[in-house]
Image: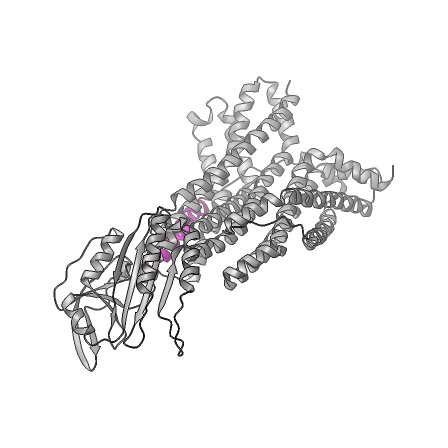
Amino acid sequence: MNFRQFAFNNVFRNKRAYVAHFLSSAFSVMIFFIYALLLFHPDLKGNIVSSSGTLSMLGTMGLRVSQYIVFIFSFFFLLYSASSFIKLRKKEFGILLLLGMSRKQLNRMLFIENIAIGVAAIIAGIIVGAVFSKLILLISASMLAIVDGLPFYLPGKAILLTAGAYFILFLLVASFTSVMTRKGTLIELIKAEDKPKPEPKASVLLSVLSALLIILGYACVFLFVLRRMFSFLLLLGGVALVVVGTYFLFTQLSVYVMRAMKKRPRIFLKRTNLLTISELIYRLRDNAVMFFMVAVISATAFTGIGTALAIGDPGLAAMKNPYAFTYDSYNESDHKNSFEQKHVRLIEDTLRREGFDYRKVSYIPTYSDNGFMLIKLDDYNRLAQALGYEQETLREGEAFATPSTVTQTSEFKLDGLTQDSLTLTKEGSEMTLHLLKALPHIVVPNTTNVYVVSDADYAKINAGNLLKIVSVQFVVPDWHHTLRIAQELRDTINKDIDVDEAGYVNYNFQALVTDWVESRQLNGLLLIVSGLVGIVFFTFAASFIYFRLYADLARDEEQYRMISKVGLSRRELGRTVSRQLLLMFFLPMLVAVIHSSVAFLALQQLVDFSVASHTLAIFATFLAIQVVYYWITRWRYLNHLHQKMI
């Protein structure tokens, strides 16, 4: 057996230790390959470009940035797992050095082991990614609202990019691994497992500080949304406070709580609590950094996916524009829209033919010389009734301000009116109206400086106005299912384009579903990006827990074997281990859920539709995955311990 075979045999003999490392590595390779597949897919790129050049640019940037994130995080994950294996095998390294192996040969052995695992992970990740590539393309087409779907495509560039990038990554990790083995004398390596652990301690001041930092971080986030203080530094500061507070929560507060429980005999001395609490104190302290990383990574994944889902929700599009279809007709003395009645009837007939319920309403705005858009009260009340809002009353000389954008709606809700009068100018004369209030809903979207005035005041300002704009709105409850008829209407209406020699267009047709599809495409890109990154992060987080469990397995086997001699039953062992594993698996996730819930509550303040369904779906999905992983790990872990019990 030569030296290379010896190194390969080491990998196979330690397959229990390397399996999570290999599977997580292969998984990250697969995700990176999927990004490359989407990035190089010509049809995907073509569909996005035809929809929006901005979306194409953002999508390409998002996919590339996500590749970098996965790649960089993979490096730190692999480095962490490699360092865990080195700590676990210190005694083995000491024995090999004692038998005559040189440090150079030891480094070479570790280098070959890491490269062997890396090459196997690259091959497995690319093969699995290729096998599931058609399914990935089908899901991506659905997320990006591409009606014709995405044909199967396996780009050679994606394979070469993935293989080359990860081979370099594993070379770097293997090189760093060799550096890690230079520390420690022969005696320290052999006696590494016998070195006793000091009793964990916690600072009361830092424990209290952890809670204060998290509360202050939450306050910054809610200040950001509730007071509309849209400062990047404020948001970044809030996140930083929560992250630092979370670190102290696991390193200090959790240990302090367990030590406090240890000082209460009625709890500590009850059945197996003595063993459970004593062991948990050490586990919490030893795994504090790992718990911190898992909590922050999981919270980032949950929040990113939830935000992407909220961006693509139909409710967000309806917040900006409550009308499914808008037809604006422009008429002047020498510019008449001869197609107005034809087009409006076409929209109505098409909606009736396709079985859509709808309400049609129209208004005729007028404009003052100083740039204010005015609609009369009668028109506003008909619009409000069609949208299900309360009707209003006005007297002559009075007016309402009405928002036309989401930002303006938020400003009115937060600050109200900044003035109590409105001065209008028309052909050299002035009219001052008393502003009563700001209305809470968008009724006339996508414009600025909109005011509702009495019918009498409207008639005075509109007198002699040569331009007559008729805006016809269609309220359709199921508007997000109107994409096909929206395209049909647009094609038919565009055939009647009536443009004179000066380039004057007499009408404009707008469909809300078209804007929503573009938003869905952007959301699809964000969801693909955040979803895949979140899944990778979550997989790495679960692997961290596996590594920590396996690193302590030899000590736990010896400990429980000795305790079983004094009467610890298998049932009591199962209960004790289950409590410890529950804490390791679900405490970081509980903290992540709390952090994410605060983020979603803050997000809810910015939108008028509910994000609860997205929040619950994300939490339920990841919780189900974690439960399955917990039961599999518990089963394997107990099997190892049962074999050592007497």
Quadrant in the rendering for residue 129: top right
Whole-percent x, y for residue 601 in the image: 37, 48
Q: How many marks?
A: 0
Please say if 169 is above or below 421: above
Residue furthest to the right in view is 1
Please say if 1 is above or below 108: above
- Quarter of the image with the N terminus is top right
Q: Nearer the viewer, residue 573 or 632?
A: 632
Q: Is residue 410 visible?
A: yes
Whole-percent x, y for residue 594 in the image: 42, 43
Residue depicted at 65% across the width and 38% down the height: 20
Q: Nearer the viewer, residue 441 or 458?
A: 458
Quadrant in the rendering for residue 39: bottom right
Is 184 covered by the magenta stretch?
no
Q: Main secondary structure of the magenta part?
A: helix
Whole-percent x, y for residue 605 in the image: 34, 52
Horizontal relation, residue 309 to residue 340: left or right: right
The structure's colour scheme is one colour
Residue depicted at 44% across the width and 35% down the height: 260
Horizontal relation, residue 249 to residue 393: left or right: right
Please say if 173 is above or below 95: below
- Quarter of the image with the C terminus is top right
Is 205 covered by the magenta stretch?
yes
Q: Nearer the viewer, residue 112 or 398?
A: 398
Horizontal relation, residue 265 to residue 558: left or right: left
In magenta, the rendered stretch is 200-228
Residue depicted at 64% across the width and 46% down the height: 30
Q: Is residue 255 visible?
A: no
Q: Nearer the viewer, residue 276 or 551?
A: 551
Quadrant in the rendering for residue 45: bottom right
